[in-house]
Each structure stands twice: as structure tokens, then as C-alpha cells.
Amino acid sequence: MTTEETPRESDPSRYRLRPFELPSEGVYFAVAAAKNCSPLELQPLDVAIDPDALDALFRSDRGAEALRLTFRYCGREVVVSPDEIRVCDRRAAEPEPVDD
Amino acid sequence: MGDRFSRGEGASGRDLFGAVASHRRRRVLALLTDRTSPVPLADLATQLVAREEDKELLAVTREEQRRALVDLAQTQLPKLEDAGLVARDAERRTVAATDHPAFRDPAFAAAVDTHDPSWDPALSALANPRRRAVLSVLRRRREPVDRRELAALVAARTGDRSEVSEGSKSEEAEREGAGSEETRCPTEDERHRILVSLHHVHLPKLRRAGIVEYDAERETVAYRGHPALTERWLDAEPGESPRTAPSAEGRSDEIRTIEGREDVVAHGQSLFDRADEELFLMITTDGLLEEECIARLEDAVDRGVDVYLGSQTPEVRDLVRERTPDVTIWEPQTDWLNLPPTRERVGRLVFVDREALMLGTLGEEGAAGVPRETAIAGEGADNAFVVLMREMLGPRLDHLDAQSEDFLSQIPL
């Protein structure tokens, strides 16, 4: 599906969504992993984005394969795609290239 | 044409709450349910603008109408159609409300008639089975609950009631469903995942809707409630949403058997919630009257329902009299409580608006000295069981008013 990018120096931590995992779940587990803390120590994801809306956006029956969503949460840049979550520790967020 | 308007049943698992979580869509539904024939889209758009802007139909401009039409076609009607609440006729460019059973649920109808935008977040909050489970648990608690305990309780419900696998099409259920089928007893990991989802998603959502207070520092959650909430919806099986309600299954001559105290209590309480006019109860021992029942009686009285409670046990009468003074209390004068002559005896009887009925009987005591409880239930004005009981109780019910008059006059108030 997506072409794997060659790892760069600031390679973001990646979190693959499990088959029945919601994107919203993936986000807080991914960010907790990136920050090396418990997801319960993070402020609620709800402050950054409406989790229901996020999940609805990525519902598989709506042709969301090419969808990438970027937002900031807990000081990180989070990029959600249908099968993985990327967490980047970047201040300035350049728009993520859509390459497929 | 006929079947196009009768697809309610099939669509019942869809996300009804999400569909009505927009004041604009509720208004559309209210406009459509007022009509007996399909409405041309153009007319609907004009009426919608007129209602929203509170002006005459003639004062609606072409531009306003056009905008509304586009929004209806692109956004609102597809949502309502997905939920099985409306059906469009693309050729004729008309739309009509379906005969979805939810429309016969008074609470659903009331929600549809409430165009206050502040209800949107509450209804949207309900659109998720886990949040309904959270509210169902919290509703029973008067004190703030530790979020960890809440998660465990929600997990337990999820475990033994297949909370998310009921074929619901709500997004969470859709994804979680397949995995949770055989795991009835929640694992530590499941409890943790639920706790984390409560913290990040569900509790903030419920807090925004004004339904709960969530103190992330203290890690506690407290219930506040909302007029949009009907108990029955909270306890509904996830896929069913408002469908479980009254006439949905109540059609016809079906008489159901309900086994086990918990299910008997749950069904009894759901009956309490749907009373519109009259709620007639008989309860034999105070052990059967739970805190939750009393709260629901209070709710019923607040809704203007005439509540009658009969009990031969003074404790029951005193308890109810103290807590809900507006309930008419009476003492059954005959021994007809003990209908069956054998060991089985009547534990409780719930009769709602004289058209839905549950008769619970207590069997032998099981473990922990709690009697085994079973009930039979029937619904619908022409349901055989209901008809029978109405015939038997009818004269007594009417007579009750007279009795209660002087009964009440004897009580110093």
C-alpha cells in the first residue's frame, strides 16, 4: 500500500494499529510510548481533538486509505493514517507529504 | 413503496443517537413525522429555514432555501437514512419518515421535539455503547466514584453482556466487536484499556455534555444527569439504542419469561421509566425495593405519572412514603398477593399505563438466602397477558382511587 520511507535521523516513533484498535486509542498509546509514560499521565486526548470525530474519519468503509491527519498533542506532532500513528518531537510542523 | 418505508427493523442496530445528535436533524425529523405522505425536498428545505429562522415560509429567500437544500441532501438526510429513520425517493425528490420503532418510544419522540442545540452533546455522548455503560453504572451512585473502580464495573458489564458486540454499527462497536465475542470475563489488560479510554475519550466527552464531573487530579467521576437521558437507553443493549423501548418488542401476543433477579429488576425498572400516565406497583418485601427503584419512582412522579404502590409490608410503605411523598400508597386488603398457592409467591407486580406488565414470583431461597426470582412480562394493549391482568386488576385499580382518598386523609401530612 504505502511505500516505506527510509528512516531519517529524526525518525518519528511509529505505532502500528492493531486490527480492532481505534485510531484514537492508537494516539494515546503511541504518545505515551514516545514520552515513555503511562497513558493515564497524559492530559485527555479530548483536549486536542474530538476522538469520536477522529475515529469516524478513519472508518474503513469510507475509503480513508489516503487520509493523513496531523495535529499537536502533548507537545508532539501526531500523524494519523489508517494503519499507523506517528509521533514526532518537532516544534515546527511541516505538512506531511502525501505520497500515494 | 411499502417496503421502502418499513425498513425500520433492519436498520435498528444503526447509530440512532448519532443521527439525532444534531438539532437540525431533529428538526427535520419533527417536520417529517408531522406528515403522513412524503415531502418534496424543496418544501422541506423551505420549512426548515422558516422554523430555524422563525419566519414565514414566504419570507424564506431562494438563497436560504438553496443552502438548506444542499445541506439536507449532502449531510443531514444521508445520516438520517443511514440510521433508518427516513427514506428518500431519488426520482420523485421526496423524503419521508420511516416507521422505525424508535419513533414510538416516547423518550425518543421527546428528544426529536427538542430543538435546543444544548442537547446535541448529550445525545452525541449517548451514541457510544461504552458511554452508555458508564452512565448506567454511575447513575446508581450518589457519591463520586474512583475512575479505576468505574472502569472495573464497566469492564464487568462489557464482559457479561457483550456490550460492544451486538451487531452495532457504531464505530467503536464495529471494531471492538469481533475481538470481544468470547472473552466474557475481563482481563487486567481489558480493564486497563477501558480505564485509559475513559480518561482520554469518554469522561471528557460526558463532561463536555454536562452529564458527569470528571476530576482527573483526584481521579474521580460523579454523575450529574441530563434531561436528555432516559434510563432505558442507558441500560439498552448497545446495538439496540432506543429500539428496545416500549412497543418495539411489545407488539402482539408475546409473553416473555425473565429469569433471575437482576434481569427482573432491570426489566421492572425499564417499565418504571416508560410510564406516561399510571404506574401501578405491588412489592411484597422491602428487600425487593432497591435504592435505584426509588430514584426511578421519584423520576416518574416528577414526570407527572400517577404512581400507586401497594405493599403489605409496613417497611415498604414507610420507606416509599418517606422518600416519595407523592406516591399513592395503599395496603392490599385481601390476600390476593399470594396468588399461587404453592411455594412460588408473587414478589412484585409492575403495571404501566395498563398496557405493559411484569409479574415476578419468588421461588425457593438460593445461595445467600436470596429467593430465586422469575417473571413473566407482556406488552401491548392487546397482549393476552395484559388483557387478562387488566381485567383482573381493572376494578381494583379504579377502586384504588377511592380507597387512597380516605387512606391519605388518615395520614397526617
Image (cartoon, helix red, strand yellow):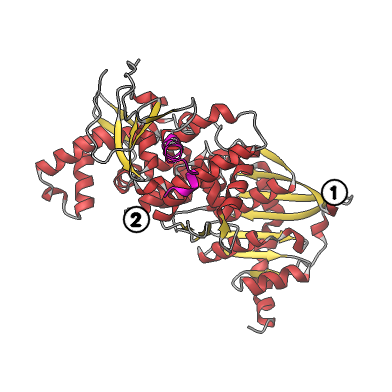
Q: Position of residue B294 (x, y in %)?
A: 63, 63
Q: Nearer the viewer, residue B82 or A24?
A: A24
Tell me where the magenta segment starts and ends, as one range: A26-43
Q: Quadrant of the C terminus of chain B?
A: bottom right
Q: Residue at x 58, y 63 (%)?
A: B142
Which residue is most to the bottom?
Answer: B412
- Give residue B248's quadrant in the image: top right
Mark 1 = which residue? Answer: B367
Question: Circle 1 marks a residue in which chain?
Answer: B
Q: Chain of mark 2?
A: B
Amino acid type, residue under disc 2 in the picture:
Ser
User: Could you tell me which residue is drawn at 67 percent across and 69 percent down?
Assistant: B320
Image vertical order of residue B221 relative to residue A76, above or below = below
Q: Which residue is mark 2?
A: B118
Q: Position of residue B175 (x, y in %)?
A: 49, 29
Q: Position of residue A37 (x, y in %)?
A: 48, 43
Determine whether, in the image, residue B33 is placed left or right of residue B100.
left
Q: Check disc 1 and give the amino acid type.
A: Ala
Question: Between B363 and B381, which is closer to the camera in this rendering?
Answer: B363
